[in-house]
Image: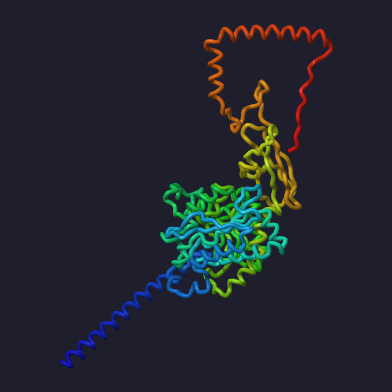
Amino acid sequence: MVMKTKLLFFLLLFASLISSSLAKGSLQQTLNSSEKFDDCSNASRTRHLLEDESRAQTSVDLAQGYMSNDDLERAIKEFGQRCSNISRIYSIGNSVNGFPLLVIEISDKPGEEESKPAFKYIGNVHGDEPVGRELLIFLANWLCDNYLKDPLVKLIVENVHLHLLPSMNPDGYSLRKRGNANNIDLNRDFPDQFVSINDDEDSRQPETRAIMNWLRDIRFTASATLHGGALVANYPWDGSEDKRTKYYGCPDDDAFRFMASIYSHSHYNMSSSKEFLGGITNGAEWYPLYGGMQDWNYIHAGCLELTLEVSDNKWPNATELPILWRYNKMSLLNLVASLVKTGVHGRIYSSGDGRPLPGSITVSGINYTVTAGKTFGDYHRFLAPRDKYEVVATMPGYKSKNTTIWLDDGPVTLDFVLDPEVSVKGSVLQNACDCDCNSKSTQEFVQFLWGAHLEVFFILIVILGFLLLLFKRRTKVKFPTSRPLAGSKRTVEV
């Protein structure tokens, strides 16, 4: 009996050793295949953004020292209470797993609609790139603590509506992977100009829809998303029509290069990059992608957006976060401040009644239109400094106007006063906004006149005509030398 027991024990021990050996061999094979994928990817691209997710998942200490999603939510709400005089907290929706996408707005009049430009920063688009979410909390606290001390901070708070979304992809962060909870890369989930994808809005991820709806509610002038895996400021286009890797600039190529250079040259060492001249790059020339958020912002939302790679390491040790903040602080501040330090800004009015017009602003030679706001008729057109630009304002039902500006020394404030178009007979064409809301009453009055009272109406016309004839004769006798004055033409400044 004892011999049988010992034999059974050795058999079980032997079986467990074989099972363990097979399991390790399978795991090693998986890791080897993953490493081959990484080597192939890095050999074909200089952009280290598609790192093996399985490697991130097996590193249990990656997020040590970083804020968890609960920590982030708590930090945002505590900031809102501590700095309530110049901020508000709101949500633009929820992630797949129901985590709120919380935004911090910073302004001297948060939540109020004003004729100021709006700027947004978005972090953590990819779940395994968490540096951006930490930097945006650093930025919010810096603005709060230095509002009454630092002139640059004061300029931003009083002249810009700044919106910070620290994490667009909280689910991906908690899972330590690039995509969201549905394993979708959110920076490939937007409608694209070159590839017919994501045309059905209901098929997009909830995080993507939240961003799109956000930009329908708020008219952002410019923005940037914070990524990791390289050190460079990337600008549109992100893809090309023939899908080849080559420089493919958008209509505002000069403005985007200027924006990217502001960030790069304000950074501790981004502009000294040996890989990217000046620390900036055109997306299509570097790493073509389709369905990206940056191109969608420019095409569909009138918002000039950059993609900022702020750390060579996607998951740097948490002890490096204060250093990364110091390296990126002036870049983050200067990029926002550039909205009011350059470009052309103004409002569009009607010369008839002085009311604001939601017209359009174009610049000769740049195939891109900026729309003015409905409430104030305000527009904000980001442009690179240059000798001169010809700016044109248009509005349906009004005569367009144009003027030339010089942007070699700071921003230009330019208001347009548009004259209504006139018909051949000289009557002012009715604007769509001036519709007669009493048309029903008018019809009833006409029906009254042409009904049973037609005879009375006819007699009144005869009497009025006779009185008018007598008045004209008396006027000719009394004022024989008088003549009508020529109508004076009103001129208004641009």
* Image quadrant containing the C terminus: top right
Q: Is residue 367 something one can see in this rendering?
A: no
| Residue situated furthest left in the rendering | 1
**On screen, residue 492 above or below 425:** below
Residue drawn 64% across the image and 63% down it: 144
Q: Is residue 457 something one can see in this rendering?
A: yes
Query: Which percent across, then down, holds residue 375?
Result: 62, 42
Foreground of the two, 14 or 133: 133
| Residue situated furthest bottom in the rendering | 2
Hey, which quadrant is residue 205 in on the image? bottom left
Foreground of the two, 172 or 56: 172
Hey, which quadrant is residue 427 in on the image? top right
Indicate the colouring scheme.
Answer: rainbow
| Residue situated furthest right in the rendering | 481
Foreground of the two, 469 or 360: 469
Query: Which percent across, then down, holds residue 61?
Result: 48, 75
Using residue 421 as the reference point, say whether residue 3 is left or right of it.
left
Hey, which quadrant is residue 465 in on the image? top right
Residue drawn 42% across the image and 50% down it: 203
**On screen, residue 300 above or below 143:** above
Query: Which percent across, then down, holds residue 6?
Result: 21, 91
Using residue 30 as the reference point, say whether residue 113 is left or right of it.
right
Total marks shown come to 0
* Image quadrant containing the N terminus: bottom left
Query: Which percent across, then down, holds residue 425?
Result: 66, 20
Foreground of the two, 317 or 217: 217
